[in-house]
Image (cartoon, helix red, strand yellow):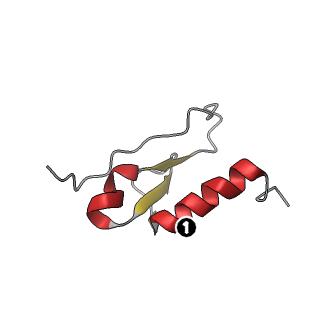
Amino acid sequence: MTTHSPRWFKSSYSNNGGNCVEVATNLTDSHGTVPVRDSKRPTGPVLDITPTAFTAFVAGVKDGRLGTA
């Protein structure tokens, strides 16, 4: 069965401080995208990111290559 609705989740590292994003990785296979949204605005805009770009983003965060300015 293919799921067409995003199943949103926040990182387990989220501290509920309000500055969180949610992702829905369940659409990667069926739609070829990883939707991302602001957890404070669940009805707001959604960015559809390719799985390759999302994987590179996560790797950059983990490696410390995407620090704050």
Identify the residue position indicated by label 1 in the image.
53
Name which residue lies at 61% across and 40% down.
18
Q: Position of residue 41 (x, y in %)?
A: 48, 51
Amino acid, disc 1: Ala
Q: Position of residue 14 (x, y in %)?
A: 61, 35
Relative to 57, does residue 7 appear above or below in the rendering? Answer: above
In the displayed structure image, the side of residue 34 where residue 19 appears, left or right = right
Asked whether residue 51 appears in the rendered view, the answer is yes
Q: Quadrant of residue 33?
A: bottom left
Name which residue lies at 54% across and 61% down.
54
Under tag 1, what secondary structure? Answer: helix
Q: Position of residue 40 (x, y in %)?
A: 52, 46
Q: Quadrant of residue 58?
A: bottom right
Observer-nearest residue: 64 or 42? 64
Name which residue lies at 30% across and 65% down.
31
Q: Quadrant of residue 7?
A: top left
